[in-house]
Amino acid sequence: MIQAIGLTSNPRKELPPAVDDVSFEARPGRVTALLGAPGAGKTTTLRLMLELQRGRGITYFRGRPLHRIAHPSREVGVLLSEVPGHPARTIRGQLGMVCAAVGVPIRRVDEVIEVVGLVSLCDERLGTLSRGMDRRLGLACALLSDPHALVLDDPAGGLSVTEGRWLHGILRAHAAHGGTVLFSTDDPKEAARTADRVITLEGGRLVADQEAADFARTRLRPRVAVRSPHAARLGALLAKEARAAQRSVEVVREDGNRLSVYGSTCADIGETAFRHGILVHQLADETGDMGPHATLPAEGLASATVVTSALLTSTSATSTSTDDADAPMDDASTEDASTEDAPTTDEPVTAVTATGAHTPDEPGPTAESRTRAAASPGARDLPPLPPPIAVRQALSPLRPLRYELRRATGVGTGYLTAITVLVSSALLSVLLARIGHTPQPRLLAAWPRDCPLPPAALGAGLLGALAFGEEFRHPALAADRGTVPRRLGLLAAKLLVASVTALALAVLTVGCDLEMLYLVYGRDLAGVPADWLSLSASWIGLTVGCAWAGVLAAGIFRSTTAGLAAVLAVPVVVVPLVQKTLAGPSVRKAAGFSERLRELLLMQWPFGGARYIAAGARLVAQPVGGALMLSLTALLCAYLLTTLRSRVR
């Protein structure tokens, strides 16, 4: 069961809140529709329920608010907008990535794809999907973790009749298995046709909470649409015959030459027009929307009313009931005035003025909802004002390493970047060897003296920046809020995958350059340097450090461009500063650093570890190594600071 109590959004400057004190229930095993015109507050209500927007109130999902549920995705399946996946990712790849995020086995993908009917399209790219297929994919993402409740915002919007019927069939099947379904719509006919209960919003307030049968009886009424060049005359004749036959017929004169007749049939209206020689252009059965405050006239009382626009007051006056012939003239004029002042909307607005009929006042749904909210679990412990709603942070994927691997391998960006790096590096090494005056280590790395970084380091930094940049551009982890969780588990997974990618790119680059130099110039330039071990450590440290810098900077600034700019800033800005700092005279030296470190830790370095510690210290002491280490430390501290700040908020 879903219980929403006192949902109120924060005021927007001088404007009233978009949602004001909305309370309702959505019961298990039933489909509940949240109905309202555009701007009525449907989406805001759903976002307040899901703790995606600040406000006041509380929503219980089977007795617990969402922020108290360990795994919200396993309790509530959400579909608020289009699936924000990478356009180049396939349907199967997107669902596999979401599976790793919510912690369900990969075999669940095949089950859900079969349920939503995407078996033949599972290898299609997301950028090529139609509106209907995108809705099917969004529903598949919502059903992946087999949630108890489904919350959907206008799921059938923009779909064809066939697609909409299929979607509502899936929702009905989920409710039949004991689940709770809540969806929003602005079509009253769709709500009456597909839902068990209809909750109506208007201007951010709850105006009705009805069973679907009651909703259809009070708001949706069958009518006959008539178009005729003599609409006024035909309306008067229909009202006259209805009074003579003691039948309750209501004739509504709308814009132009159109009539809406309630309480009659196409056959009766056609016979009346034929007898009096009136030309009719259209005669069709329809279902009219009476508006959110509609009521029915009292049954068993004969009445006939013609409701017209302000330009046709004479027609209303001629259709006065014969039973009220002796009534005072003031009453008739008052009745006409009230009819003329009735508000007009896009749908026909009817004013029922049955003679002698007194429409009973219906109990206010707002009071009923408040009484029901007060009896809900936990409501008696609430303060006089509803509790504030804090924006719920997106959770880290339950299987971050598996998620990151599927994210990185699901699109061709990484493969294309690696191929570009290898080709450009091989060509650049051949060109540098032809020009000459380039040391062999720089030839193998394809690193000209005038370039800030070699192609392999730039490629590793770009791939690292894409690790977080694509998350913010296509937020699969936070599809409903647009922000990506800054969690240490996700960061560790991204750093690990970026390290492996950078290491592979560094080894492949040197191998390709070495093979290319051998093919073009022979063995003279294809030899292995004598100090290859220290050079390899420096080379791997450079590429991995650039990848880490891209990951951290993109995670902090939420942009791939910012991540790549941070990678370039290391040699362009930080290295000159470090060189300027180290260029001054040195009075002290760090000789014997490894021995003193061993004495401090009271342990022996195994396998000649002192030599490796000294080599690492020498790498850090170099300008590029020191600048890279300084940049990584600053970026990591900034990332941790933003993570702690988001948790405090």
Image (cartoon, rainbow, N blue to C red):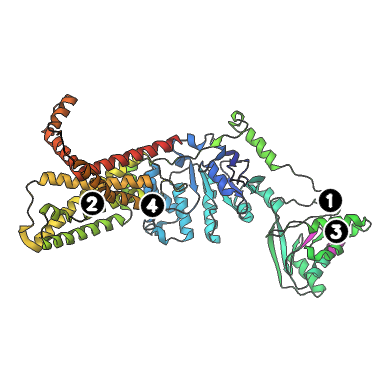
In the image, which disc is placed on residue 457? 2
Magenta stretch: give its range: 238-252
Amino acid identity at mark 3: Gln
Mark sitting earlier along the chain (4/1): 4
In the image, which disc is placed on residue 246? 3
> According to the image, label 4 marks what residue?
94
Inter-mark Cα distance, 3 to 1: 14 Å
Residue 170, image x, y percentages: 51, 51
**Mark 3: few/some/many CA within 10 Å (<14, 14-19, 20+):** some
Which of the two residues, 440 or 31, is positioned nearer the viewer here?
Answer: 440
Residue positioned most to the top? 602
Q: Residue at x 8, y 57 (%)?
A: 525
Inter-mark Cα distance, 2 to 1: 85 Å
> According to the image, label 1 marks what residue?
357
Inter-mark Cα distance, 4 to 2: 29 Å
User: In screen coordinates, is 477 left or right of 406?
Assistant: right
Mark sitting earlier along the chain (3/2): 3
Amino acid identity at mark 2: Ala
Amino acid identity at mark 1: Ala
Q: Quadrant of residue 592?
A: top left
